[in-house]
Image (tube, coloured by chain):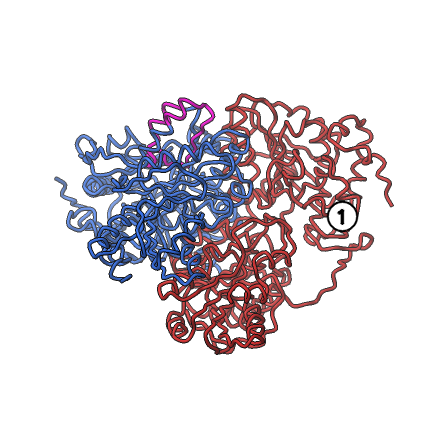
Chain colours: A blue, B red
C-alpha cells in the first residue's frame, strides 16, 4: 500500500534534519499512513495524532531532542514523535505494535522525558525542568506542547501562571484544534476562537494577560511555516507562547468529519471509518446512561455532570436528549466536584460521573467541598478494577482514595440489578454524598444475585455456610461464588457475603459471623493497601480470627495481561484456596 | 474602650439597611474594633478581615442575604460578615469568642452557605448554586467573593472558565489586596497590577479574556462607593467580575506595615502589635528550616518549594537567605508537585514542603507526575496529627492519602534526631520520591531514642520484650513508651517498635515478632481507616494474631479539645491497656 519511501530513511531526528523542506509534506503523508495502519488495527488516539504530524516534524527539525526537551501534554498525541524518534516500526509493522505504548515512555526512548497520561501537567513538569536547568546553568530549550482541551484543567493554569515569571528560556506550544475529547467547554475557548479569527491579534489575549510573549500560527498543518516560527523561537531568552491552529484528524476524512468519535477509537476500517468491533454487550456505562435517561425524563431536577468524557461514559445520547440536564465542565474535575456539591446543597439532584482514575484529581474537593459539607450528591466512578490498561490509566486506587473520606458512602454493586437499586437509593436519600463504583467488565451473571433492598451500612449474606466466610466486594462477588464452589468440592461450606459498602462495616453481621466462622477471606477488585479488606482485617484482628485479604498489590502496572495480573495477585479460586488451607 | 454605638443596633442585615450612608464609616470603625478585640486575644486572621470590612458592609447593605447567597473564598475573611449577621458578640464579648469559629459555618447561621477553609473553591461552589437556581427557576443573586491570592489556585481558574459561560446572574468579586498569605506569585499578578494602575482599563484583561463583563473599583475601602457599584450589579442577567482594590489590614497600622505577619497571628498587644506568645520552644518546622538552611549553603542544588505558606513552615529566614534556592509557587499545590517532579527528574534536589491538610489538593500529581515517574524528590508534610483544629484544617488524612500510592516512601520520624537522619537519607537516595510527615507537637523526649541509621523498609525495635508488641508510628512512639511503662507496672514486658515507614512493612521483623508475641498493638497519630495499623492488621490477620489498632476515627472534628479526642479514640495508656487486656 504505502512504500514509506522517506520514512524508511528516518531513524532519528538527525536523519529528519537532512531532508529538504520540500520533502516534508510527503514525509507527513507517510507518517499519517503509519499512524492509521496502527490505530485501525489495534485502536488508539486518531485525531490528536493526525492533527499534530507537521508540528512534531517541525519540532524535531528545529530542536535538538533529547538535549532540548519536549514535554507532550497527556502524550496521547505522541505517535508522530515516536515515529520520528526510532519507533516507527511499532506503527508500520503489524508484528511490532506491542513494541511501543500509546503514551510517552522513558523506558522506550531518551526522547520521552516523562510517563504521562493525565491532562494539563506538561507546563508544570516542563517548568520544573527549566528551573533545574537554570540552577545547573545549562542552556537547552524546554518545550511544553499542550492541546486547547487541556487548558481547561486547573493545573495548566497554575503552570502558565508560574511559567510566565520565568526569566529564562521556556516555550509553550498551544496545539489548538478547536476540540477537547468532545466539544470544548469554558470561557477561554471564546478567547481562543477570537484569537484564531483575528490571526492572533484580538484584544484581551489570555496568554498575554498572564504575561507571555505570544505568536500565532494559522497554518498549523504546514511544516515549513511551523519550522520558520520555531527557528525564531529557538533559544528564546524568555517565556513564549506559540498558538498553533491545527486540524484534528487532518488528512483522514472520517476523522475530520466526526472528531469526537475519532479522538480515541477501537479498530476500524480505514476505507469507510466503520468501527470493526461489533460487541453489543451491555456494560455498566450504558446501563447507567439508560437509567439516567429515564430518570431525567421523570425528574427535571436530575443534573448529569461530567468532565470532558461523555463518550467513554456512554453519555452522548443522554447529552443530545437532555441538554438542559447535562453539564460538561471540560477537563476540570476539581470544579466538577465543587459545582456538584453546590447543586446538591441547593436541593437539586446532581449525578457526577468520572472515568476510573480521573476522580483522583479531585480528592481535596471530594473531601472538603462535598463530604465536609455533606452535600447529598451522587458520584459514579466507572471502569474500575484490575485491568491490562496503560500505567497512567489504572483504576484500582479509587477505594483507598475515596473510602477513607468521612461522610462519603461508598457503594460497590455486584451486578446490573444491584446497580439500579443503588442508584435509586443514592438519589432518594438526602443525608450523605454517595459514590458508586462500577467495574469495566460486563455485568456478572451471579448464581446468588442480591435480593434485599439497600440499607445504609448493611451487607447481604448471599449464601449461609460455616467456618469460612468469603466477602466478595462488588464485581468480585462473582469470584467469591466461584471460590465457594471449589471450596464445596473440597467438602467446605463457606458463607458468601456481598458487603455492598466498601467503607461501612456491617458490625452486627460481622459480630454474628465471628461466632460461627474462624476464617475470613476478603476479595476486592482494586488495590489492597488502604482498601476494603484491611478494614475487615482490623475488625477481626481484635478477635484473633484468621483473615486473608485478596486484591491488587500496591503497584503501577503497564499493559500487563489481565490473566497474568490475576495470577500474580492470587486471584483464582485455586490460588485463594491454596493460600488459605 | 469602644462603645459600639452603631454596632449595638445591628443584629441582622435588615438593621444595617436602615442606616444612613453617612453612618457607615463609623460602623466600619466599630467593626474593626470588634475584630481586633477578638484576634488580639485569641489570634486569627487579621489583615484579610480588616481589609474587607467595607466590602462586607456594602454587600449586606445591597443584597438580601440569605436569599441572595454570598460565598466567601477560604472564608478566613468572614469576620465582618459574621459581625453583621448576628454573631457580633463573638467578637465584642470576650466571654463569647467560642460561640463562633473563624470560618463560615452553616450550623451557626443561615447566612453561611458552606463550611469552607481551603482556597480557590468559591467560584465553583457558587457556580453549582447558580446552576441549581436556574434549574429551579429562582432569581436571587449568587455572589462569590475571592481574594487575589486565591486566584493562583487551579480550581479558581476552572470555576472562572465555566462561570463565564453561564447565561444568567452571577457575580464574582475579586478582593484585590495585592497579597496572598505572603507575597503573590504568578503572571496573573502582573495583570492585576496593570489593571489597578490603569483603573481597570489596561489591555489584555485576564477576566475579559475568559469572557466576563468587568468593573473596577479603586476605592475598595469606601463603603458608599462600593454600594453604588453593587447596586448597579445587583440582578445582573449575566456573569460579572467586580475587581475591588482593598488594603490588607486597613485601619490598623501594624497590620498594614507588616501584612505577612498579620495575615494570621497568635494573640498580640493591640497598641504595639507585639506578639504575646513568648514560646521559644523548638518545633519541627524550625528544625527542618534550619536543616535546609545549612544544606542549601553546602549544596547549591537544593531547591525548597512551597505553596504560599512560608510563614507557617518557618521558611521566612530561609527565603531571605537563599532566594535562588527558594520557590513559592503561590497557592498552587498541583503545580508545585509536578514542578518538583520535573526538578528531581532533571537531577537537582527539590524539597517541597506542605502544611498538613493542603497536600491533599495534589493527590493526582503525587501519584502520576511524581511517583509513577519515580522522581526522587523529598516532600515534607508538616503539622500533622490529631489536633483541636478547625474542621477544614485537620491533618489526620495524610497517611491514608499518601501511603497507598505506589513508589512513594513514607517516613514518620519520632523525634528531632530521627527527623534529621531521615532528611539526610531522603536527600541522598536517588531511587524514590520520599514523604516525611512531621507532627504539630514539639519533638518528643524519648526514653529509648532511635539508634540505628535509616534503611529502606527497616523498622527499629527500640525495646525488646515478649508477648505484646507495641508499634508507635512517628510521634506516637512516645505514646507506645508510656503505654509500655504502664504495662510494665502490671507485670507485662511489651516490645516497642518504631516502624519508621508508614507504608513499607518490615516483613522479616514482623515474622520474627510473630514467633514470640501474640498481641499486636499499633498506634498512629492520624486516621485509622486506610492508614498504617490496618496494614499491620492485614499482615497478622493471616497468622491469626490478635491485633489492635489505635488512632483517629474517620471523622471530621471541629475545634474539639485534644484531650477529648484522645479520650474518644482511646489513646491514653490506660484505655489502650483496658481494651487489650
Magenta part of the protein: which range?
Answer: A293-322
Left or right: A108, with B180 as reference point: left
User: Which residue occupies the foreground of this view, B170 or A255?
Assistant: B170
Q: Is residue A304 magenta?
A: yes
The residue depicted at 58 percent of the width and 44 percent of the height is B150
Q: Quadrant of residue A578?
A: bottom left
In the image, residue B509 sits, relative to residue A421, either above or below, namely below
User: Which residue occupies the foreground of this view, A245 or B234?
Assistant: B234
Image coords of residue A107 (percent x, y): 29, 58
User: Which residue occupies the foreground of this view, B250 or B301?
Assistant: B250
In the image, residue B349 sits, relative to residue B109, either above or below, namely below
Image coords of residue B534 (percent x, y): 44, 59
Image coords of residue B481 (percent x, y): 56, 72
Q: Tag 1: Cα neighbours inside 10 Å, few (<14), some, or many (≥20)?
A: many
Question: Can residue A424 be seen from the camera position used here?
Answer: yes
Left or right: A513, with A29 as reference point: right
Left or right: A541, with B311 as reference point: left
Q: Which chain does tag 1 point to?
A: B
SS at circle 1: helix
Image coords of residue A409 (percent x, y): 46, 43
The residue depicted at 67 percent of the width and 46 percent of the height is B102
In the image, residue A161 sits, relative to residue B465, either above or below, namely above
**Residue at the extreme left of the image, as rendered:** A1
User: Which residue occupies the foreground of this view, A288 or B354?
Assistant: A288
Question: Can residue A73 be seen from the camera position used here?
Answer: no
Looking at the image, how many numbered discs can be counted on the residues?
Answer: 1
Q: Quadrant of residue B208?
A: top right
Q: Which residue is mark 1?
A: B38
Q: Is residue A333 magenta?
A: no
Amino acid at each position: 500500500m504505502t512504500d514509506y519511501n522517506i520514512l524508511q530513511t528516518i531513524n532519528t531526528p538527525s536523519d529528519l534534519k537532512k531532508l529538504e523542506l520540500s520533502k516534508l509534506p510527503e514525509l507527513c503523508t507517510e507518517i499519517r499512513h503509519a499512524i492509521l495502519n496502527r490505530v485501525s488495527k489495534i485502536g488508539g488516539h486518531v485525531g490528536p495524532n493526525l492533527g499534530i504530524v507537521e508540528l512534531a516534524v517541525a519540532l524535531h527539525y528545529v530542536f535538538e531532542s533529547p538535549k532540548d526537551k519536549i514535554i507532550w501534554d497527556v502524550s496521547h498525541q505522541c505517535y508522530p514523535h515516536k515515529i520520528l524518534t526510532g519507533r516507527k516500526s511499532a506503527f508500520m509493522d503489524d508484528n511490532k505494535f506491542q513494541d511501543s505504548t500509546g503514551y510517552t515512555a522513558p523506558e522506550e526512548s531518551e526522547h520521552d522525558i516523562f510517563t504521562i497520561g493525565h491532562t494539563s501537567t506538561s507546563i508544570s513538569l516542563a517548568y520544573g525542568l527549566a528551573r533545574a536547568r537554570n540552577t545547573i546553568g545549562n542552556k537547552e530549550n524546554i518545550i511544553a506542547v499542550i492541546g486547547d482541551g487541556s487548558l481547561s484543567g486547573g493545573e495548566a493554569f497554575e503552570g502558565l501562571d508560574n511559567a510566565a515569571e520565568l526569566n529564562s528560556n521556556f516555550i509553550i506550544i498551544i496545539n489548538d484544534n478547536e476540540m477537547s475529547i468532545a466539544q470544548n467547554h469554558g470561557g477561554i475557548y471564546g478567547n481562543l476562537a477570537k484569537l484564531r479569527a483575528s490571526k492572533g491579534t484580538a484584544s484581551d489575549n489570555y496568554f498575554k494577560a498572564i504575561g507571555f510573549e505570544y505568536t500565532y500560527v494559522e497554518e498549523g498543518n504546514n511544516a515549513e511555516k511551523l519550522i520558520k516560527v520555531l527557528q525564531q523561537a529557538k533559544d528564546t531568552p524568555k517565556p513564549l507562547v506559540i498558538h498553533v491552529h491545527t486540524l484534528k484528524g487532518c488528512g483522514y476524512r472520517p476523522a475530520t468529519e466526526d472528531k469526537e468519535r475519532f479522538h480515541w477509537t477501537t479498530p476500524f476500517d480505514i476505507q469507510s471509518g466503520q468501527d470493526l468491533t461489533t460487541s453489543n454487550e451491555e456494560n455498566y456505562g450504558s446501563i447507567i446512561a439508560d437509567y439516567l435517561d429515564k430518570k431525567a425524563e421523570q425528574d427535571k431536577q436530575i443534573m448529569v455532570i461530567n468532565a470532558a468524557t461523555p463518550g467513554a461514559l456512554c453519555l452522548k445520547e443522554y447529552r443530545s436528549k437532555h441538554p438542559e440536564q447535562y453539564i460538561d465542565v471540560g477537563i476540570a474535575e476539581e470544579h466538577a466536584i465543587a459545582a456538584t456539591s453546590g447543586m446538591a446543597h441547593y436541593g437539586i439532584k446532581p449525578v457526577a460521573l468520572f472515568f476510573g482514575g480521573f476522580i483522583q484529581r479531585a480528592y481535596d474537593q471530594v473531601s472538603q467541598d462535598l463530604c465536609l459539607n455533606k452535600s447529598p450528591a451522587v458520584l459514579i466512578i466507572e471502569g474500575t478494577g484490575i485491568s491490562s490498561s496503560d500505567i497512567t490509566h489504572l483504576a484500582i486506587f479509587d477505594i483507598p482514595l475515596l473510602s477513607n473520606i468521612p461522610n462519603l458512602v461508598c457503594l460497590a454493586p455486584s451486578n446490573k440489578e444491584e446497580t439500579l437499586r443503588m442508584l435509586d437509593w443514592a438519589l432518594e436519600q438526602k443525608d450523605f454524598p454517595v459514590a458508586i463504583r462500577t467495574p469495566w467488565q460486563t455485568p456478572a451473571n451471579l448464581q446468588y444475585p442480591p435480593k434485599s433492598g439497600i440499607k445504609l451500612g448493611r451487607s447481604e449474606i448471599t449464601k449461609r455456610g460455616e467456618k469460612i466466610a468469603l466477602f466478595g466486594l462488588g464485581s468480585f462477588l462473582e469470584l467469591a461464588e466461584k471460590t465457594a464452589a471449589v471450596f464445596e468440592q473440597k467438602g467446605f461450606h463457606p458463607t458468601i457475603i456481598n458487603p455492598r459498602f466498601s467503607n461501612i462495616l456491617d458490625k452486627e453481621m460481622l459480630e454474628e459471623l465471628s461466632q460461627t466462622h474462624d476464617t475470613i477471606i476478603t476479595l476486592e477488585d482494586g488495590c489492597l493497601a488502604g482498601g476494603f479488606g484491611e478494614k475487615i482485617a482490623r475488625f477481626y484482628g481484635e478477635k484473633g480470627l484468621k483473615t486473608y485479604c485478596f486484591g491488587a498489590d500496591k503497584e503501577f502496572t503497564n499493559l500487563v495481561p489481565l490473566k497474568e495480573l490475576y495470577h500474580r495477585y492470587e486471584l483464582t479460586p485455586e490460588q485463594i484456596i491454596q493460600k488459605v488451607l
